[in-house]
């Protein structure tokens, strides 16, 4: 059963106001799945999965482009973020079942999927599990399956392979970041941009984008660090999905200067999916999507 949230919500993006419908889906086991919608109300559905950390608000900047292209963006809080509950036994394949419940609850039979950064593994799981219903798959700055240590920078090896396997460490690290975010958001965003290149750092210093990022992160982490902690644990394990079984037309966008996700892991996605097309973005970083929504959505609209 899908319920509307009690309060009306408005997202400010510069001088614009993007009105969003925020709703709750009650899953069969009693868990809540919260999501927002943007774009055309009666458009072709696109399930858009946010990064790590993030929330349902991440895709608000896509509202106008989606409306022009006739797309309906359905943007859920992933497990442990915002208004969505944590799964008792999280796995990528289990997430696909929740998205199936969401699409069924909205009477959506066919849809496209977009996964950004840490949302990409979950988008891949949906495409692998729901082959007959996923029309197109877009992956932007994607987190891919971890590769051998020699193929990753030491920081990636620590963040995505070693530390998440130590009990309690992911929750502690994400909890510390959450504390900084709520006490000194400027410092928190600066920490998040340490590994980024100049083009990303300049973007984060832009007031409009900085405020959007702050609200997106704060909404996602409002109730605790369970969301990103769960992500890190899942990223560090062998993935329980078969990338070579994905048959939806797939496109991967990756900035050549992206230092947030391991380059070799992201490129591995395009290698293993038979239909995948890799688009390398020259001299672009991790946050290219903020300027590239129209390109991504235009490709998704070509059904």
Image (spheres, rainbow, N blue to C red):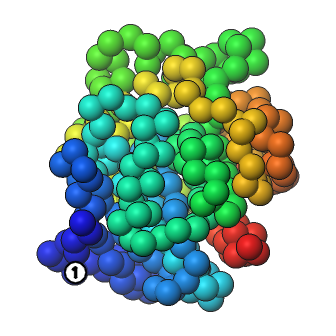
How many numbered marks have been drawn onto this rendered protein structure? Answer: 1
What residue sits 44% from the left and 31% below the top? Answer: 91
| Residue 160 visible in the displayed image | no
Residue at the left extreme, as displayed: 6
Give 183 or 222, whichever is nearer the viewer: 222
Q: Position of residue 96 (x, y in %)?
A: 48, 45
Q: Tell me the quarter of the image containing the C terminus.
A: bottom right
**Disc 1 residue crowd, few under 14, some 14–19, many 20+, Cα 10 Å:** few
Nearer to me, 30 or 121? 30
**Residue at horizontal 30%, vertical 37%?**
87
- Residue nearest the observer in this picture, 48 or 253: 48
Quarter of the image for the N terminus: give it.
bottom left
Q: Up-down: is 173 above or below 215?
A: above
Provide residue 56's location: percent of width, then percent of height: 39, 61
Indicate left or right for 273 with 161 as reference. Answer: right
Residue at 50%, 87% in the rendered image = 42
Residue at label 1?
A: 8
Residue 176 position by quadrant: top left
Hey, which quadrant is residue 193 in on the image? Answer: top right
49 vs 229, left or right, is: right
* Residue 220 located left or right of residue 193: left
**Quick one: SS at disc 1?**
loop
Residue at x 64%, y 23% (from the top left corner): 146
x and y percent of residue 220 in the render? Answer: 32, 51
Q: Does residue 94 appear in the picture of this structure?
A: yes
**Looking at the picture, how far across and down is residue 205, in whole percent?**
52, 59
């Amino acid at each position: 059963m899908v319920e509307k949230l009690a309060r009306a919500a408005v997202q400010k993006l510069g001088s614009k106001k993007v009105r969003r419908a925020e709703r709750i889906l009650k899953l069969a086991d009693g868990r809540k799945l919260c999501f927002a919608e943007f774009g055309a109300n009666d458009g072709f559905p696109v399930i858009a999965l946010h990064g790590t950390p993030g929330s349902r608000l991440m895709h608000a900047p896509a509202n106008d482009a989606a409306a022009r292209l006739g797309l309906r963006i359905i943007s859920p809080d992933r497990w442990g973020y915002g208004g969505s509950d944590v799964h008792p036994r999280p796995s990528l394949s289990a997430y696909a079942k929740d998205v199936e419940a969401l699409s069924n609850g909205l009477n959506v039979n066919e849809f496209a999927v977009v996964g950004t950064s840490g949302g990409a593994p979950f988008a891949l799981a949906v495409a692998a599990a729901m082959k007959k219903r996923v029309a197109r798959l877009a992956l932007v700055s994607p987190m891919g399956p971890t590769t051998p240590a020699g193929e990753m920078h030491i920081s990636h090896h620590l963040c995505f392979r070693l530390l998440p396997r130590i009990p309690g460490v992911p929750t502690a690290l994400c909890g510390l970041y959450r504390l900084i975010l709520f006490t000194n958001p400027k410092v928190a965003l600066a920490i998040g941009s340490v590994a980024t290149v100049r083009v990303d750092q300049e973007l984060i210093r832009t007031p409009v984008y900085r405020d959007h990022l702050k609200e997106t992160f704060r909404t996602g982490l409002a109730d605790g660090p369970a969301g990103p902690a769960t992500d890190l644990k899942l990223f560090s394990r062998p993935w329980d999905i078969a990338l070579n079984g994905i048959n939806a037309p797939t496109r991967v966008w990756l900035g050549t200067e992206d230092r947030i996700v391991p380059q070799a892991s992201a490129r591995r996605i395009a290698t293993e999916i038979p239909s995948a097309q890799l688009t390398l973005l020259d001299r672009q970083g991790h946050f290219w999507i903020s300027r590239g929504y129209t390109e991504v959505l235009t490709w998704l609209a070509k059904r």
